[in-house]
Amino acid sequence: MTTEKNSATKKPHPPQDVAQDINWNDYRDHLSTADSSGRRKWLFPKKPKGKFYQARTYVSWLLLLIMFVGPFVRIQGNPLLMFNIIDRKFVILGQIFWPQDSIIFAVAMMVFITGIIVFTAAFGRLWCGWTCPQTLLMEMVFRKIEYLIDGNDHQQRALDKAPWTLEKITKRLGKHGIFFGLSFVIGNTLLSYIIGSEALFQIITDNPLNHLKGLTAMVLFTLLFYSIFARFREQACTFICPYGRFQSTLLDSNTIIVAYDERRGEDRHKLQRQQSATERKEAGHGSCIDCHQCVSVCPTGIDIRDGLQMECVNCTACIDACDAVMNRTQQPTGLIRYASRNGLERGESLQFTPRIVGYSAILVALIATFLVLVFTRSPVETSLLRAPGALYQTMPNGDFSNLYTLKLANKTHDRKQIELKLENLPGEISVLGTELFVEPEALAKTSVLVKLAPQTLTSGQTNLLVGVYSDGEKIETLSTVFIGPQTN
Ligand code: SF4
Ligand code: SF4
């Protein structure tokens, strides 16, 4: 997808209160959130209204609920998600992953990276607009609180310029107090995804001196989120998040993005009093009435009519704003819509091209593979290796014996009793010492002795299959070799 400027920017008329210092024909040389001297220009986006905003609100309720409730949901006693990088213990959908599960992790990383590439190539920045926690929290939580306390965009702008009266001080203290409290909740939620909700409760309820590291993390996370949502805001998407930056390498002409239909919108022209849509057409004017509603609602302060821009998080606010204008001016909606560049140039509506269908199928297949790997993996990871340096021993009855080292990792919350059986040959297998138990979420190591009769051996190295059983159920079959004397 090209990022060239549309020819549509011939007659820019930015509203004075939105951008006073920017030459809109040079928009690629200027940040929408900085004035000509490079100072931060605070944005006061108008509150969006429309079917997409409504749908995004419902989606955000669901996702925020999952996000905040996630650390407390238990599946078979395990959290829904936990990424304990300190103890190298990870839980996904209630399944505990250990460093021994590195193959699943490698597959998960491949799924993640491929998923991002495939998804972005097909659907653009759908993730950013609909599901990214930054956008959800900023637009659906913090921004809404701001509208409630400070009023609409005009009132916010006026309050910003107003002197420090009692009303302004009260509003500012109230708003930032709520922002700080929310940041504390978000910070603690993130912390509980890292160390687990039980550990978090312990930090909160125990003597603070026993949890100085945890408390420091709590304070740092709170400050981090407060600075992002109270001050940094859209800059996090523009400067920090790498996703927006590599979208230009992932998108192409078939990628679905939020786009302005330049062919239909141009030549943009202000609406004349009592001019009908037909009269506009006859006068050679496009559908765009240059009202700047799409710019006023944009949380990143850009003009979608300038074409695809890195700052666009595909939040759909401009679609809703423009659709409302189209309805008021009795023109068809969809001047700004989800569309691919090819779709726009050929005047086609949204098409599910074979490429998109193919990409979607790959993505679904990858996710399915990952889920199969996760849910079919063994609850007890085992490995059986011949004891280093040991060959075979001849027993008093003429049988031969080999010594092995058995390593086990119990990934469950239950204490497991392990039993071993020879699967392909008659013989004897025994654990040296007592019965073999592995404590919950623990590792165990023991020596195992295998005895085989001489007539059982097929060569100097006989293949051996050992079944690992727990609670009467086979959990794994291990393959190794039994060393004996050369038989030729
Ligand atoms: S909201 Fe629609 S009509 Fe108004 S300026 Fe934007 S694109 Fe043009
Ligand atoms: S241009 Fe439209 S979709 Fe993109 S960030 Fe602005 S309002 Fe959202």
Image (cartoon, rainbow, N blue to C red):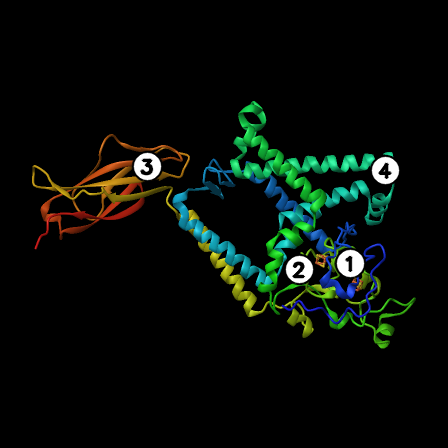
Q: Badge 4 is on which residue?
A: 164
Q: Nearer the viewer, mark 1 or mark 4?
A: 4
Residue 333 is at least partly visible in this image:
no
Residue 191, image x and y in percent? 57, 37
- The residue at 60%/56% (across/down) is 243
Q: Badge 1 is on which residue?
A: 295
Q: Quadrant of residue 286?
A: bottom right
Q: Secondary structure at mark 1?
A: helix
- Establish whether ligand 2 lies closer than 8 Å to the Cβ of label 2: no
Mark 4 in CB contact with mark 3 (< 8 angstroms)? no
Mark 2 in CB contact with mark 1 (< 8 angstroms)? no
* 340 relative to 87, above or below: below
Q: Amino acid at mark 4?
A: Trp
Mark 2 or mark 1: which comes first in sequence? 1
Q: Amino acid at mark 2?
A: Met
Residue 396, image x and y in percent? 7, 37
* 261 relative to 223, above or below: below
Q: Badge 3 is on which residue?
A: 471
- Establish whether ligand 1 lies closer than 8 Å to the Cβ of label 1: yes
Q: Nearer the viewer, residue 403 or 429?
A: 403
Q: Secondary structure at mark 4?
A: loop
